[in-house]
Amino acid sequence: MVRSASRYSTIAIVLHWLIAAAIVFQVLIAWRMHDLKTPLGFALTQLHKSVGITVLLLSLARLAWRLANPPPPEPAGLAVWERTLAKAVHVLLYAIMIGMPITGWIMVSASRIQIPTLLYGVIPWPHLPIADLPAAAKAPWRSFGHESHEWLSYGAYALVALHVAGALKHQLFDRNMPVLARMAPGAKPRAWFDPRLLAIGLGAVGVIAAGELIKPPLPAAAPLAPASATADDDHDEHEDHDAPAAPTAPAPTPAAPAAATAAAPVASPARPTGPSHWAVARGSSVGFATSWSGQAIQGRFDKWTADILFSPDALDKSKVSVSIDLASANTGDAQRDQSLPASDWFDAANHPKATFVAERFEPAGEGRFIAHGRLTLRGVTKPVDLPFRLKIDADKARMSGVTSLDRTAFGVGQGDWQATDQIPGKVQVSVQITATRR
Ligand code: HEM
Ligand code: HEM
């Protein structure tokens, strides 16, 4: 007869519903990911990865539990084809529950652009070792991960539909076939309005609504104070107030500050004949500003050095060279910042430093100059002009300059990122230096 008492253990039941809810949510999130290049697409993908890895861990736990705790005997009266089909569907569902996350994990590990996985923005989750393979060896893994993730998702839709149809058939139409009760203890077969069945339906509506509506936190937009608050300001008074703008921005400490000089044009009676060296002081910064889908992004480089030999009276002998450690790019979002040095962006593994060397300076009005230099970035060298303002007070100098670059001319942003619809080609670079005469 019917063994109405037979049901899965509480742990098996809790894990079943948790995993089912997570998978439904996961698929809805995946359908909304569309364009991974947008901030929302990026944030949804981070959430998708987090929920997917959670499903993997829960499914492995459930499988282990099942092996240690065999399920209750099947209800009597099931036709052989029903038994066989149900078994096959269950085995294949396990393959989905474990295979989907693993193929997703393969896909992101073999991705050209290495975006780290931080589960729920907090717990670091490693890439598979394929992440360290050379680009050519990674490509087949990437397409395998991608294709199998997609095909498994079609399998998942079909299997879950069959599985739910089976559960509902026994629950709604069969006489004395307490199948749902095995996973939802107490459910009465043939009761269309059984409270457990209603709860499952309501739960499904809730999970679908959450999957459709959830707005995961977008990557940090403008975490840093403006890198150059007054660079374009015309009032010298204001320029002195650069400092108040700076305190909110953590002051980068150039790794090996270098020197430069400028003879104080008015104050110093004894002018040195040549340019002198200046040492970069704390509070100096090299920053950049761009946007992502219209959202402003401010960044800075935490490690750079500058070698400054400069005097307004000896422009022809002045020389400035700045060396920037590209791996130190900081936009205030850990995941984005870890992908910036990757080959699609700065390619810091092959070109760790960007250098700006200026040997020609042009006066451009009171306290203003233009440095005509060459910027080498990602192995490409192009002329770049940096207009800047300079104020020298005895042995202290303060300069600020802003210029704009076309990132695509240097190959910053490869593949899909070459397009300038989400991230514009023009990037503003700002430099603020406080220096003391050596
Ligand atoms: C993504 C969604 C789902 C997945 C991945 C899933 C997966 C599974 C798996 C793997 C089993 C076999 C458990 C075992 O023997 O270890 C199972 C059993 C079961 N599931 Fe689901 N399930 C899902 C959704 C649902 C839904 C929505 C219902 C009900 C409407 C349901 C009802 C049941 C029932 C009644 C059993 C026990 C069947 C039996 O003992 O013969 N499942 N499920
Ligand atoms: C139960 C777990 C998972 C399910 C059910 C699932 C489901 C899906 C679905 C339905 C898609 C859209 C497929 C398409 O139409 O192309 C998708 C895409 C994606 N999934 Fe998953 N996923 C899971 C786990 C994971 C995990 C763990 C990761 C990474 C760690 C991941 C990474 C991705 C990525 C990056 C895409 C976008 C692929 C692209 O179009 O470029 N997924 N997933």
Image (cartoon, helix red, strand yellow):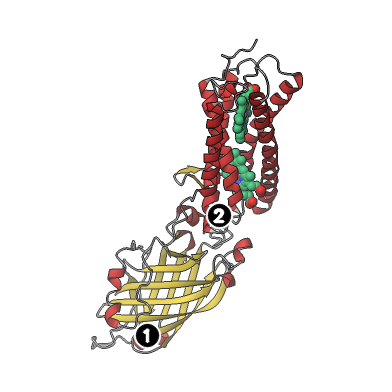
- Give 149 or 415, whichever is nearer the viewer: 149
- Give 293 or 437, whichever is nearer the viewer: 293
Residue 181 appears at what percent x and percent y?
58, 21
Quadrant holding the C terminus: bottom left
Q: Is residue 77 above or below residue 194?
A: above
State left or right for residue 401 relative to residue 241.
Answer: right
Q: Quadrant of ligand 2?
A: top right
Number of other residues with Cα within 10 Å of mark 2, as a class: few under 14, some 14 to 19, many 20 or more? some
Q: Is mark 2 within 8 Å of ligand 2?
A: no
Q: Which mark is residue 305?
A: none
Q: Amino acid at mark 1?
A: Arg
* Residue 129 visible (yes or no): no
Quadrant holding the N terminus: top right
* Residue 53 visible (yes or no): yes
Which secondary structure lies at badge 1? strand
Going by the picture, which residue comes out furthest to the top? 1
- Give 6 or 246, whichever is nearer the viewer: 6
Number of other residues with Cα within 10 Å of mark 1, as a class: few under 14, some 14 to 19, many 20 or more? some
Give the image quarter of residue 145.
Answer: top right
- Give 341 or 103, whichever is nearer the viewer: 103
Q: How many dots with numbers?
A: 2
Residue at image location 53% in from the left, 44% down from the top: 209
Going by the picture, which residue comes out furthest to the right? 81
Q: Is residue 304 above or below residue 436?
A: above
State left or right for residue 18 relative to residue 365.
Answer: right
Residue at image location 57% in from the left, 30% down from the top: 60
Residue at image location 41% in from the left, 67% down from the top: 305
Residue marked by disc 2: 41
Q: Amino acid at mark 2?
A: Gly
Residue at image location 63% in from the left, 23% down from the top: 190
Residue 226 appears at what percent x and percent y?
38, 68
